[in-house]
Amino acid sequence: MNTGWDKEFDASVGLAFSLKAFETYRKSGMLTAEIRSVPGIRGRCQAYMELVQGKVVACYLIDRQSERHNALKEHLMQWDEERGPFGWVFRENAAPRITSPVPVVTGQLSSGPLPSSPPVFHRLTNHLDIKQLQAWTAQQQHYLNLIFLHVDGRRNIEEIKEEVPLSPQMVEEGLHILLQLRAISL
């Protein structure tokens, strides 16, 4: 099953070094590591840094109770330097992009105007089936649910990308997955 993650790289040489390399090569994806001894969080937690073209666009921690805590890139770099290096893994995201369908014209051209705005997405169900999402991580399930909640039959792809607090590429990937699951339609 293709979840959009194409390549995985060991980035445990140090977070600061890895971030500079990903910025130089304009990589997009998710950088993750298990972190220990985080102030305010009991036990170990999972750190996530989402990169889009080498820039960190989201940074957070998820504790053992699956609670999400916002984090600063600088704090993670400091903890990695002082207590690490942690076992960072980078998963490059090369998800297919969703594009608006181009109308196919057969026979004579119609005299009417072509649609100027992208089509809107509609829900085919009121909620996502948990069984369909078992192949994805808890984080990916969260993202798919978040995107699904913004599909209301009024918003097009651009409006959804503006409203969902994820990178445009991740929103497109999520919409593509939801289309494949037949949870939404165009």
Image (cartoon, rainbow, N blue to C red):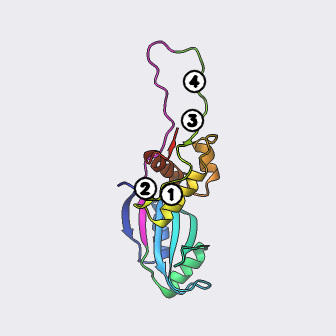
Find numbered disc 3 in the image and state the secondary structure of the residue it sits on.
loop
Find numbered disc 4 in the image and state the secondary structure of the residue it sits on.
loop
Q: Nearer the viewer, mark 4 or mark 2?
A: 2
In this view, the residue in front, 25 or 141, is 141
Could you tell me how far apart the alpha carbons at marks 3 and 2 are, in whole angstroms? 25 Å
Of the numbered discs 4 and 1, the one sitting upstream in the chain is 1
Question: Total number of numbered labels?
Answer: 4
Of the numbered discs 3 and 1, the one sitting upstream in the chain is 1
Q: Nearer the viewer, mark 3 or mark 2?
A: 2
Q: Are marks 4 and 3 in contact (CB under 8 Å)?
A: no
Residue at 55% across, 53% down: 127
In this view, the residue in front, 137 or 74, is 137
Residue at the disc numbered 3: 119
Residue type pointed to by label 2: Gln
Residue at the disc numbered 2: 132
Residue at 43% across, 46% down: 180
